[in-house]
Image (cartoon, rainbow, N blue to C red):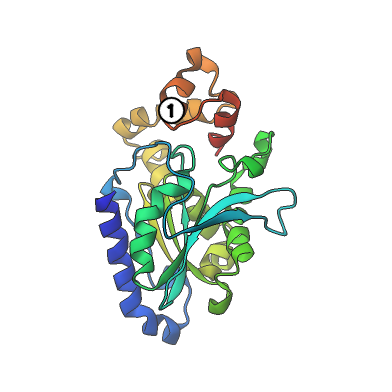
Amino acid sequence: MAQVTSVVNSVFVLIDSCVKEYKTMRAVLPSIVLLPLATLAAPFVAQDYPACATGFTCGTLSPVDKPGLSFHCAWISASDEKGVVLYAHGNDGKWAKGMFFETMSQVAALGYTGLSCDQRGYSPGAAPDDMASYNYDVLASDLFSLMDASNFSAPYGGKFHMVAHDQGARVSWHAIAKGGSASEGRKRFLSFTSLSIPHSDVFSDALLGPLADYDSQVAQQYVRMLVLPNSTQVDSQQIYNVICKHGGWTDISTCQKTLWW
């Protein structure tokens, strides 16, 4: 975690030093800075994180455009505020938003208010029973809905910095790509830091492209099982026993929803 904190802090030192240029150029994210850190192999280990932590305010956010859903979130304010950061976890265990608490505290000291939420399937109040509710268009829209519900980005024209890990990073890449140059991600992300997940095209090419890497194909075979509608129950419940229990889940149906994205 210390390594990841150091990396993310260095990103925000860069952002802090370039903020005047951002305001002057008034350009969209892809033409200024894109910071994929996929090659760092971030040392995250799924675990049962705390639901909240000292120095944070915790509660639920219920986006107006997501009727019936409430997300458990934690946020920390910066005294000398320079911007806001949304942190998105991946398949990182129960109360996964807590994986960023240490990093959020240190980045807040640099002037950036932070928001981290247990995403769809992870928040008990935002865990629909149908797999169709977890497609990437919906998951990507959750990012912006949560930020809007917090109102933290309003002073910055709705724009914010994005830091994401694992599947959260994949969803963030989708938010940038969906809609091309007019995508919500391009319009609203001031920067994007991706931890452990490369650009989606690069990732796909490594697995399915003309120069596909055999080792990558072998290493990613488990993904084929993860995306099954009943992945926690197949193969003698191997996914549940290896991933869910390790991540702090004690109920097979609850964990299943966290794997649908």
Q: Nearer the viewer, residue 15 or 186?
A: 15
Rendering coords of residue 251 (x, y %): 56, 25
Residue at image position (50%, 17%) is 237
Quadrant, the C terminus? top right
Image: 35 above or below 117: below
Image: 31 above or below 195: below
Q: Secondary structure at mark 1?
A: helix
Q: Residue furthest bottom?
A: 24
Q: Which residue is mark 1?
A: 243
Residue at image position (54%, 69%) is 188
Rendering coords of residue 201 (x, y %): 43, 49
Is 147 on the left or on the right of 109, as rendered?
right
| Circle count | 1
Q: Residue furthest right?
A: 67
Image: 10 above or below 101: below
Residue at image position (47%, 48%) is 97
Residue at image position (37%, 49%) is 198
Q: Residue furthest top?
A: 236
Q: Nearer the viewer, residue 74 or 180?
A: 74
